[in-house]
Amino acid sequence: MGRRKKMVERVTALMSNPEMIRNIGIVAHIDHGKTTLSDNLLAGAGMISKELAGRQLFMDSDEEEQERGITIDSANVSMVHEYDGKEYLINLIDTPGHVDFGGDVTRAMRAVDGAVVVIDAVEGTMPQTETVLRQALKEHVQPVLFINKVDRLINELQVDAQEMQIRLGKLIDHVNKLIKGMNEERYKAGCRVDAANGTVAFGSALYNWAISVPMMQRTGVSFGEVFDYCRAEDMKALAEKCPLHEAVNDMVIRFLPSPIQAQEGRVNAIWHGDMDSEIGKSMATANADGDVAFMVTDITMDPHAGEVATGRLFSGSLSRGTEVYVSGAPRQNRIQQVGIFMGPERLEVDEIPAGNIAAVTGLKDAIVGSTVTTLEDMQSFESITHASEPVVTVAVEAKHMKDLPKLVEVLRQVAKEDPTLKITLDEETGEHLLAGMGELHLEVIAHRIERDKGVEISTTPPLVVYRETITGHAGPVEGKSPNRHNRFYIVVEPLAPEVVALIKSGEISMRMPEVERREKLMAVGLTKEEAKGIADIFESNIYLNMTKGIQYLNETMELVLEGFEEVMKAGPLSREPCMGIKVSLMDAKLHEDAVHRGPAQVIPASRQAIQAAMLMADDTMFEPYQKVFIQVPMDNMGGATKEIQGRRGVIANMTSEGDMTIIESKAPVSELFGFAGDIRSATEGRAMWSTEFAGFEPLPKNLVTEVVSGIRERKGLKAQLPQPSDFMSM
């Protein structure tokens, strides 16, 4: 305990000097060794014993993580490292690699300034490596590279010293090619990895050794010697000469930015306020004496302290008793405790200054993505956009009636902790629907509800979340209010894919300055009038107000948009969410008396006009797809390809490396349930595979009626498919 206390004293002493801080995330594909690497860094800092490092998996503190051997939640830790005779504070976040928990990676990227990208020397860059790299670049996070499991190259693949260097060189080139392809601007500005200058380290997290060019110069250990040590399986001696934590932490301190270097560029990318304002300048310089600007990136439950909001402090200082505003909340919140994380433990400190990652209790109104500030009218940070969407749903019911009120509370809590979950109450059936990233994601959440929250639940088999969209153009369609005094004339058409891409990447939103948004939309083909007329962006749908000078419309617009959002959440054909729809209001006639244009009149008129127009515009369904990457020995390749093709899958590419075949394919999510068991038996258990969200694609025409009927039956809707006339008031 004394050792831990001493560590806290060293950490707090360094907190107030942003020059000496590095906020970093460890990101990689599943099983490439992130958590083992984190263990080693902690052992090097004297926080866990060196003997246990790599096996203790200190950061995987949850029992389910230990059972499954994967990271499910991001874990934070603060530690001190000495470099060039000076002490530095490293705030580290270990992130999950499984595609179902990719949301955790996105959120962690908002809190850090640099990322250590870990790659398995044998497997190379995998789909999730690309995804996490893309997320890092989007959040303006600087990457460095750690190539792990180099010993496998030597001892399993039996490559010689020259072949090893060639293979490692190819890996580095491939990572740079990915960075260039994702963001050429940043690549040209020096955002690349290079072994010669020291932004790449090689090693083995399991055996605690690592080497980089600067480390070789310092220790005198050459590449050839590393090869000889590995060949002789004398990892211990190598680990003593070239300790992993020194190589990686030195690289982090030399090449990843401090909050002062990072915040100017990062704040500009994630905040659309005025950079010349007081708060703008304060964030750009990580000023601890300025107003508080704190971005919540994670919420967890502590049985004793309640909700703990973890996030990045860009400006000001946090201490107990501070009164703060939370974006979107009506009242102020009072901070009760501030602390730092040491893996599973949270240690209280008196004050946390700007540039650090802080854990705060008392922010009852905060959700992930909230802006917390002492300024009443501060412009909020840009919301966090996730790379994939919830595509699998289960219905959740409490096993015992008495637990029903508790279940509602627990689901609310779970949604707060994990924003990639979508929870809805099905009014017709009274079931609570839980939509997540995949089968594993929902399985873990259901297990946690029972284990941590103490509510016994039963869940239905997983169902797929479809999307409703249109392929044609319709309108103007008239929508009349029940009292016939208000009329809206609506046109609907598909939204250009370029605009959908801008919305999904978070490049345009209703929060950003109008002029900037208008320019971006005109660049992808919207007319000036359309770009000016944007009234609402809801998921990947937009509402345009194309009317001119209509009296009372300003006062009524909020209700009109409520009708629009209701349809976008549940389309007319199947009550599934809508995507890629452009709705334009062309004209409106409104009653002059406000009493006659209230919610009960305007919302149904707006809603029904859009529903009828969508059915006239060839309403159809899109289904979610996943990319499936399979590595399988040549002899078992037939079984694997047959398995994919039998599930309406398409094989995009096949390459071979040695006696292994790598199959790149994609298949509908609805066909992939039970895939794990089937591919094992089809390949005698020899296939390694991973999936990644691949977006939505049109459902084949011959399946639309069958799928829609199935969804309608499940939701208790009328069996016959709806007609436009059902929504037109005569």
Image (cartoon, rainbow, N blue to C red):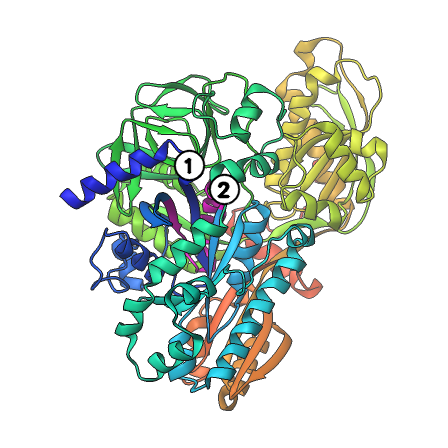
Look at mark 2 in the image and give the residue it sits on. 110
Q: Amino acid at mark 2?
A: Arg
Instruction: Looking at this view, name the residue that lies furthest to the bottom.
Output: 635
Look at mark 1 in the image and give the residue it sits on. 311
Q: Which residues are magenta?
A: 90-113
Towards the viewer: 326 or 34: 34
On the image, which quarter does residue 60 sit in? Answer: bottom left
**Mark 2, secondary structure of its residue:** helix
Q: Earlier in the sequence, mark 2 or mark 1?
A: 2
Towards the viewer: 526 or 290: 290
Residue 643, horizontal then vertical, whole percent = 53, 79
Residue 288, horizontal then vertical, whole percent = 43, 25
On the image, which quarter does residue 187 sit in? Answer: bottom right
Q: In the picture provided, is 496 more to the left or to the right than 368?
A: right
Residue 66 appears in the figure? yes
Residue under the point 37% across and 82% down: 228
Q: Is residue 105 magenta?
A: yes
Q: Is residue 703 above or below residue 539?
A: below
Residue 122, horizontal then vertical, whole percent = 46, 76
Q: Amino acid at mark 1?
A: Gly
In the image, which disc is placed on residue 688?
A: none
Residue 297 appears in the figure? no
Residue under the point 69% across and 44% down: 502
Work out which quarter of the rendered image holds the C terminus and state it.
top right
Label 1 packing within 10 angstroms: few (<14), some (14-19), many (20+): many
Q: In the picture provided, is 249 more to the left or to the right than 489?
A: left
Q: Is residue 459 above or below residue 86?
A: below
